[in-house]
């Protein structure tokens, strides 16, 4: 896969340059695994053998920073050079230490076989081989990120393929290698499924006469907009990840943003902390994947729902926030990524204790969503 142009600009910041994950061909990824194993064996066979600690890039919020995009409009999360240690001699981290080597072993086998697996497939393989160390998907996901942090190479380089929930529809032609072109205008209300193969996405030819790219948080709203063929009235491409975005959908959006750099990217999400968190993941990336965030970040603008839309929604359609909303709001408020106008919106959500879903706009009719988006675009009401 071609390196992002953002990587060259990272060399202006020495701390960022040390904290990113490479995209490697299988042979080089295997070599990094081999070097790590040889280093461990060298320590074990030394005159004074000892299990060394694994030094991993700290993936906590306290170690995250934000690149404000000096050379580009795109800002993204990155991790500084603070490390955390995982040790076999520490009771709290011993299992995590072993999990790293177990995951590397499986990844090495996958790379040798020139195959790719999803993290779900990886979980069941590890559950079968090492049930005493892997009992949940979360443990596998964390271990994969530990391996990424140790080897400084991307998940994809390790043979781990993204599971995609993403769909695309609208004014876009896609030409995958050795396949017929797909007209996303003709895919029906279900849209076209975005592949989880990042290499395939990277080599897909894209053509479009759209003027906007619109991210839609919810599948049901995406279905409504596509069924109403809103893209005939607003020349656009609709993309949804059906909630929090997976890597493949984020990669696809980033590909579109680099292929069509003049197209504004607008996000339509619920007016609640979770909707804002989804928008921020598309816009900045996530701390958990801070070593790879710059490859997926896009200059996303917030078109709605926002606080100034509440007058369009009946009072009875505003529902109380859930405990989970408060947790997400607290996390967002402590984030360095949140820009001031987003912070003001979040403060209003906290102050009112209410949440508004996109569907609340149906009080104006089922065809109102297209009119709402068109009005927002004409008035330039996106931040």
Image: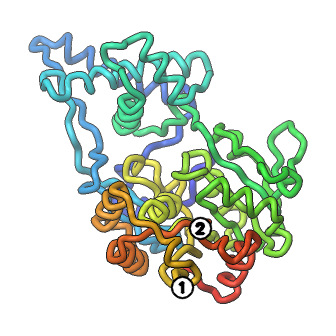
- Residue 271 sits above or below residue 8 on the image: below
Label 2: element kind: helix
Q: Say left or right for 324 vs 304.
A: left
Q: As rendered, which of 279 and 14 lies closer to the eye?
A: 279
- Asked if 44 appears above or below 334 in the picture, the reply is above
Q: Residue furthest left?
A: 48
Name the outermost residue toward the front: 316
Query: Judging from the image, what secondary structure is the residue with disc 1 in?
Result: helix
Q: Residues within 10 Å of mark 1 (few under 14, many from 20)?
A: few
CA distance for labels 2 and 1: 13 Å
- On the picture, is 359 further left or further right than 368? left
- Give the x, y percent position of residue 368: 72, 75
Q: Position of residue 33 (x, y in %)?
A: 41, 24
Identify the residue at image location x=60%, y=26%: 116
Q: Which residue is mark 2?
A: 358
Marks 2,1: beta carbons within 8 A: no
Q: Is residue 150 above or below residue 299?
A: above
Residue holding disc 1: 311
Q: Which mark is residue 382?
A: none
| On-image quarter of the N terminus | top right
Residue lying furthest bottom: 379
Q: Name the residue: 63% across, 61% down.
A: 216
């Amino acid at each position: 896969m071609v390196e992002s142009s953002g990587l060259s600009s990272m060399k202006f910041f020495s701390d960022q340059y040390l904290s990113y994950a490479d995209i490697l061909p299988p042979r080089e990824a295997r070599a990094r695994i081999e070097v790590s194993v040889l280093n461990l064996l060298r320590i074990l066979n030394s005159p004074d053998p000892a299990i060394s600690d694994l030094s991993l890039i700290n993936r906590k919020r306290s170690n995250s920073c934000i690149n404000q995009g000096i050379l580009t409009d795109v800002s993204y999360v990155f991790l500084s050079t603070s490390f955390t240690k995982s040790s076999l001699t520490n009771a709290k981290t011993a299992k995590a230490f072993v999990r790293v080597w177990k995951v590397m072993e499986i990844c090495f086998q996958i790379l040798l076989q020139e195959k790719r697996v999803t993290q779900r497939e990886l979980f069941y393989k590890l559950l079968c081989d090492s049930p005493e160390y892997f009992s949940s998907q979360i443990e596998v996901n964390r271990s994969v990120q530990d391996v990424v942090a140790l080897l400084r190479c991307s998940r994809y380089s390790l043979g781990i393929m993204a599971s995609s929930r993403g769909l695309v529809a609208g004014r876009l032609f896609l030409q995958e290698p050795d396949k017929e072109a797909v007209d996303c205008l003709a895919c029906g209300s279900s849209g076209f499924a975005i592949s989880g193969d990042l290499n395939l996405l990277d080599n897909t030819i894209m053509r479009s006469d759209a003027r906007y790219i619109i991210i839609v948080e919810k599948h049901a709203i995406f279905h409504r907009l596509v069924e109403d063929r809103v893209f005939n009235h607003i020349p656009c491409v609709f993309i949804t990840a059906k909630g929090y975005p997976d890597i493949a959908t984020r990669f696809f959006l980033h590909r579109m943003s680099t292929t069509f750099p003049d197209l504004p990217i607008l996000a339509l999400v619920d007016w609640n902390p979770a909707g804002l968190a989804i928008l921020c993941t598309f816009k900045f990336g996530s701390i958990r994947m801070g070593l790879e965030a710059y490859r997926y970040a896009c200059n996303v603008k917030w078109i709605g729902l926002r606080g100034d839309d509440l007058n369009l929604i009946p009072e009875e359609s505003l529902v109380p926030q859930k405990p989970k909303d408060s947790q997400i709001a607290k996390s967002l408020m402590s984030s360095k990524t949140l820009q001031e106008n987003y912070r003001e919106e979040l403060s209003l959500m906290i102050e009112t204790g209410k949440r508004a879903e996109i569907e609340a706009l149906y009080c104006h009719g089922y065809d109102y969503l297209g009119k709402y988006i068109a009005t927002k675009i004409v008035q330039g009401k996106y931040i």
